[in-house]
Amino acid sequence: MLRIETFDHLKGGHSFFKAIGHPLVAMGAHALIQRLTACEHIALYDPQGWLEPFCEIHPLKDVPFSHIYVQRFEDMGLERLGYTTKPISQLDPATKVLFILSFEEDLFVSHLQTLLGKNVEVISLKELRLPQEMLTNQRAYLDPLNFATNFAFLREEKGLHTRLMTANYWSSYSGKPAHAWCHLLDERGQHLATWEESLGAAGSSFVIDSAVVRERFGLDDFCGQLFIHIVGAAGHDIVKYGLDIYSDDGTVLSCTHDANAWPADYYAGLPAPTQEEDVILWIQNSHPCPIPAGAVTLSPMGREEEARGVDKEVPPFGTLAVHVKDLFPELHWPAQLEIMAGKYFVRPRYEVVRKGLRRIAHANVERTNLAPDPKIKTLAPLFGKGFILPAPLLPWDTWESHVLPTPMARSQKHLPVALLIYGADGHEMGEYRFGNLPRHHRSALMVNDLLKEVPDEAGKGYGHMELVYDFEAGDEADGWLHALFRYENAHHQTETSFGSHIYNTAMTYKTQPHSYRGAPPGLTTRLFLPTGPQGTQAFCHLIYPASATWHGLSQTSLMLHNAQGECVATEELRIPCGGSRLWRVSDIFSQKDIEKAGERSYIIIRDTTCRLFGYHGLQDAQGRLGMDHMFGF
């Protein structure tokens, strides 16, 4: 387990680990440590408490320090690198070199004027700072906006392509230009290409297609990761994007979400394969230090004592495909696994191969800071159904819909849950009580089994599902309710996963109803729908979940934008409270408007009256589709 801080659910993301792990910093850090190792009479000064996380990424064990000094009284007397820390006020006069472990050299040198001799050389992390032109806030180096970065899975091989798409929402906040610094790494973590791209005017679409990258830089096949650094970020230090993965022969069509920029201790929601599947976990190292063999382990959910390690080292920024059946040949769906990731990588992708078809989805962060909350049981009747996890129910005459509840907090021992099933018009069609599931459960539900006698009252043949807490079955709840939703037909499979929120209540409880920006309650909608690569059509399943009674109909605007961020057409939707709407772009907009929007177009889904939740996807001419939950900004 890397002893670094990456994310705090109260304070947000930390930037120090990004600052020392940035690809531009890696080579400079290696040279700096070599220089320190050659010094004599060298001491280390750690005024901000960065020593431990720095050494996790860039070990200093070979540097011959004479002493380690600290500024904070609370840090005195600690063991660090085999030394006992001392107060900086007792700096040894024999010191010839002082290494200040901070990016703010000038600040701390000014504090030491009365202690430093004339012949003391000062070295610091200032030498590893990114160029000034890459900083959004040049006055505060570790401002999170200076490290608006993320990784993306990028593969271009054997007719398989990857397409990343987002919009320039940063300039919408600042009114100033922004650009992306892009750094492509292969499976060995080796540099393939580096380039910059303007993000255009506010709202302009931003697309990186692996096929275009390959042609532009004359590359061979590659499978690795793309590091993206937004320069000029504002409003969000998060790089959100949709990732479409497709193939020339139609055997792959998947949509996934962004990678979540902060490496976590644990991930969960990784399905075991069926007898005829191969499930591949893609481990992509987020740091310029190797992942040691055995440092990452997998275990059957709820059976941590059965953990088995990945026996291969992953090089710095490298990529490794791990076949679940190689570690657990005896484990099959509906079993699921959790990943002890040790903060080595961001939210990982996994790939399911079945009968020549491939689908790609992502695991989710397993929370380490949650405990069961007895107050959740008391939220009714003020909050009605309380926490809801909504998901599509695809047309049941052609698609099978499966639900697998997934524990997503380390503290969860039981999941008392039930599934509510609704038609498109919001009428309830059925209910299934899972009971008080143990953490190690293997209980998946094929929802179609509950619909055999259900008439199509809405006249649409689809609807949505809501996973909720069932307090008649058990008391344990923490608000972090997750599930994996799998969809299959004769031609294709797709799957997605997400977690619960309280929806559309005037009252608030802690962070709920959740808002992507600002304090709760989140009672409005702003979602991003990319239109997809050529040969596919985007679709959207919009759900209007309501924990308690809310507006009878949504007032939803669908705004079609061209690549320059200009709105070329707007259409309206009205979704019943508790209902849903499944639609394709061509169902809503005329062919004339679609052609006017052109390539790299997108749709903003806006509603100021209620909070909708959506799933975006792609469909090809053969009816194959891929799907994941939507995001907004």
Image (tube, helix red, strand yellow):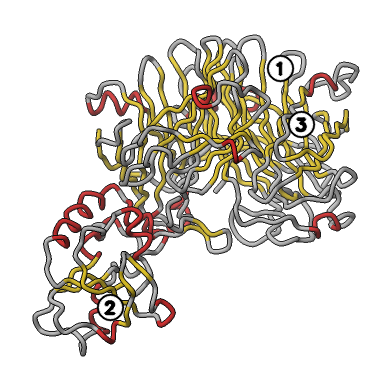
Circles 3 and 2: CB atoms closer than 8 Å: no
Specify the label residue 399 is tagged with: 1
Compared to residue 494, the image places residue 56 above or below, namely below
Quarter of the rendering containing residue 40: bottom left
Q: Position of residue 419 (x, y in %)?
A: 81, 35
Local crowd at mark 2 within 10 Å, few (<14), some, or many (≥20)?
A: few
The kind of residue on which mark 3 rests is His
Image-based side of 139 in relation to 599, left or right? left
| Residue at image location 65% in from the left, 47% down from the top | 525
Between 206 and 145, which is closer to the camera in this rendering?
A: 145
Q: Quadrant of residue 119?
A: bottom left
* Residue 349 in view: yes
Q: Amino acid at mark 2?
A: Leu
Relative image position of residue 79 (x, y in whole percent) = 37, 70
| Residue that badge 2 annotates | 107
Q: Is residue 511 left or right of residue 330?
A: right
Placement of 509 over or under 573, stated as above or below = below
Left or right: residue 494 versus residue 348 is right
Which tag is nearer the camera, tag 3 or tag 2? Answer: 2
User: Closest to the observer: 147 or 599?
Assistant: 147
- Residue 591 place in picture, x, y as percent: 56, 21
Looking at the image, tell me whether mark 1 or mark 2 is earlier in sequence order: 2
The residue tagged with tag 1: helix, strand or loop?
loop
In space, the residues marked 3 and 2 are separated at their CA atoms by: 57 Å
Work out whether residue 589 can be spotted. Answer: no
From the image, state whether disc 1 or disc 2 is nearer to you.
Answer: 2
**Residues marked 1 and 2 touching at CB (< 8 Å):** no
Q: CA distance from mark 1 to mark 2?
A: 63 Å
